Image (cartoon, helix red, strand yellow):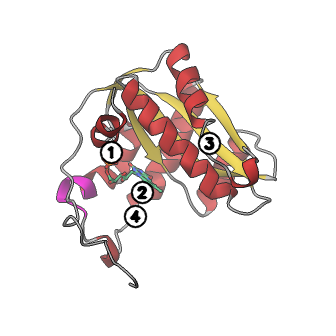
Amino acid sequence: MDLYEAIRKRRTIRKFKGPATEKQLNRIIAAGTQAPSAGNRQSWEFIIIDDPGLIQKVSTIKYKLNLVYKFPDIEKCQSPEQIAASQGPAQRESFANASLVMIYHRKRGRFQDASAWLCIENMSLAAVAEGLGLRIATFWGKAIGEINQLLHVPEEFKLAAALSIGVPAEEPVKKIHRQEGSWLHRNGF
Ligand SMILES: Cc1cc2nc3c(=O)[nH]c(=O)nc-3n(C[C@H](O)[C@H](O)[C@H](O)COP(=O)(O)O)c2cc1C
């Protein structure tokens, strides 16, 4: 698949009808590890979670987090479909029938978080190449501590995101795009 086509096709999928195979997961993770990283530290760590009980616990933590989440004004470009997709129930459902991969990076060192996110984008595009859907889930506040405790994560690592990866069971929600070129400046802001 042409790279530009994969970039265009990549959309967030939040409903799945089956997990990725182990081989697909390995290829997707390998693609992630090809990403650039600050100082070439490659400080990403992946936890594949295939224990249904653990998946259930992570999904409940995310559900509770997003039950009370309100989009700030700055996020006005959200369509009603996107807002609905961000609510608690949709966030919990996204963990069902999918593989779950947690991405961690070392806290120490500059831009290790940025490097982990580049890895996540590589994984997102690799999922497209595999014909799979992918959903990024992020956590904040006390939820991060709860997840780290659940997964016995050492203190020196920080959670970037949880990725649900699997066979898509929906079309992506409608997305509002900023007007093309509205982000472009020349010789100053
Ligand atoms: C940093 C970051 C955090 C995100 N966190 C979540 C999340 O917690 N839950 C979720 O369903 N989607 C999450 N997303 C997906 C966005 O909602 C999605 O990318 C956005 O609505 C644009 O849609 P698209 O990916 O289909 O182009 C996140 C994406 C990014 C880049």
Classify mark 1: helix, strand or loop.
helix
Residue 132 part of the magenta segment: no
Q: Marks 2 and 4: in contact by CB < 8 Å?
A: yes
Q: Is residue 32 left or right of residue 80?
A: right
Q: Is mark 1 within 8 Å of ligand 1?
A: yes
Residue type (three-letter) at the residue carrying disc 3: Ile
Q: Foreground residue, 82 or 123?
A: 123
Query: Is label 3's Cβ within 8 Å of ligand 1?
Result: no
State which tag comes first along the sequence, 1 or 2: 2
Q: Residues within 10 Å of mark 4 (few under 14, many from 20)?
A: few
Give the residue type that dot 4 points to.
Tyr
Amino acid at pointer 2:
Asn
Rendered residue at 26%/58% (across/down)? 83
Mark toward the viewer: 3 or 2: 3
Q: Which residues are magenta?
A: 78-83
- Of labels 1 and 3, earlier in sequence is 1
1 lies above or below 185: above
- What is the CA distance from the residue labelled 1 to the residue labelled 3? 21 Å
Rendered-image quadrant of the N terminus: top left
User: Which numbered disc, 3 or 4, marks the residue closer to the eye?
Assistant: 3
Q: Does the residue tagged 2 have its C-beta within 8 Å of any atom of ligand 1?
A: yes
Residue identifier under label 3: 103
Query: Does label 4 or label 1 sit earlier along the sequence?
Result: 4
Q: Which residue carries the number 4 mark?
A: 69
Q: Would you identify the image quadrant in which residue 102 lies?
A: top right
Q: Position of residue 161 (x, y in %)?
A: 55, 48
Residue appearing at x 66%, y 35% in the figure: 46
- For marks 1 and 2, give the CA distance: 9 Å
Q: On the rendered structure, is 100 left or right of 94?
A: right
Residue that numbered label 2 is attached to: 66
